[in-house]
Image (cartoon, rainbow, N blue to C red):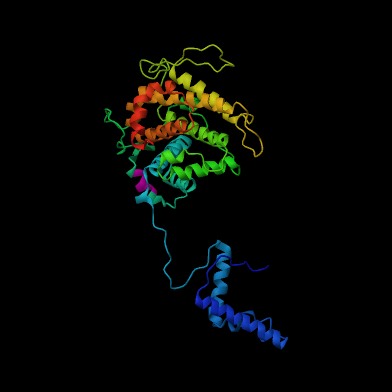
Amino acid sequence: MAPSLVTNKKLNGQAREMLSNVIKFFEQEKLNQAPVIPLDQCVKRASVAAGVSMRTIERIRLEAKQNALSDQPWSTPDRKRNVKKSKLGKLNEMELLAVRRIIHECQENEGFHVTLKKIADAIRTELELDISTSSCRRLVRNLGFKWKTTQSNKRILVAAVKSPVKEFETTVVEENLICGYSSRSSKTFKPKKNIPEGTHQYDLMKQAAATLGSGNLRQAVVLPEGEDLNEWVAVNTVDFFNQINMLYGTITEFCTEESCPIMSAGPKYEYHWADGHTVKKPIKCSAPKYIDYLMTWVQDQLDDETLFPSKIGVPFPKNFSSIAKTILKRLFRVYAHIYHQHFSEVVQLSEEAHLNTSFKHFIFFVQEFSLIERRELAPLQELIEKLTAKDAR
């Protein structure tokens, strides 16, 4: 088997001297037209050629075998390795909110079986952050979560304190609530919509996530240079669906037929459901039923390859802008309902920072491309002005 090539590596003086010795050794054999040392004496040949002791060659030979078995890189003896310092103490607000989202997704997926190891694995995968289980425990605790033993002797993760990030005043109920999901949440809490890996839209999604990590939401929504507007809108629409899906999933136990008999955003705004196909005439229904209709309808649109193509070369429909605007307009209504009817529960769950940042991101995006008419935003206009005042152009 041919040896692997070492590419893009800067060799130090000792390594360059060693390679010079090897070249001279081969050149001498070329002049002699015969091996300087018999070919079957590999260790001795390597020792003489490199100009190092046979003992050193044996040690390198042994390390090569160990590296091959464990897929480890070569080490430098007597040199302190540059250990990557943990970023945990320097995570910005967007990264902390991303960790909080990951924790809730782990809870939704794992239920009572969620563990620190599973949370740490998810953080490593999604944020590409090298984090140990012990560091994960500290991070989870700093975000206001703690482990609690229930009467049935099961350990669950609960929100212990209110998040320190607060955008506007509200009354906080001093009560710890389990950050879990009710038995009915599986109906309304839709599966996460994933963009196929390897597609251009997947690359766009990763680019958007990287920009979000900078904490500059206004810059994060700007169309990247040279990219197609429809693809950018499609990728972000999927992301907002997933965000709203997760946010509403945390409060489904509070949004019931009894507590929310109508889909409203305060006393002035009420929404009736119609999709133009299965429900042509608008119907009055409870908030959980309306949101279930809505999220199911949106998911069907996103899964339709003729409306949201993910394959390269497949064009978007001519009316794609109209489709996206309708989806985003309806998703806004979920934000409006949560803020008007369930903000106190959001605070109890220590989710207000995540909700505010998600909504702020959403508003910057629809403003950037004029995707929702101002009159549709009226139920939250005062909040919009307050959240976006610091980032006004």
Tell me: 7 left or right of 173.
right
Provide the residue span drawn in magenta: 136-141
Residue 175 at x, y percent in the picture: 28, 30
Say above or below: 112 vs 257. below
Q: Is residue 179 visible?
A: no
Q: Quadrant of residue 375?
A: top left
Q: Residue at x 39, y 57 (%)?
A: 85
Tell me: 51 left or right of 27.
left
Q: Quadrant of residue 258?
A: top left
Q: Is residue 250 visible?
A: yes
Identity of the residue furthest to the bottom in this view: 32
Say above or below: 22 vs 278. below
Say above or below: 20 vs 376. below
Residue 138 forms part of the magenta stretch: yes
Q: Residue at x 48, y 36 (%)?
A: 109
Please, what is the dominant secondary structure of the magenta stretch?
helix
Residue 191 at x, y percent in the picture: 52, 32
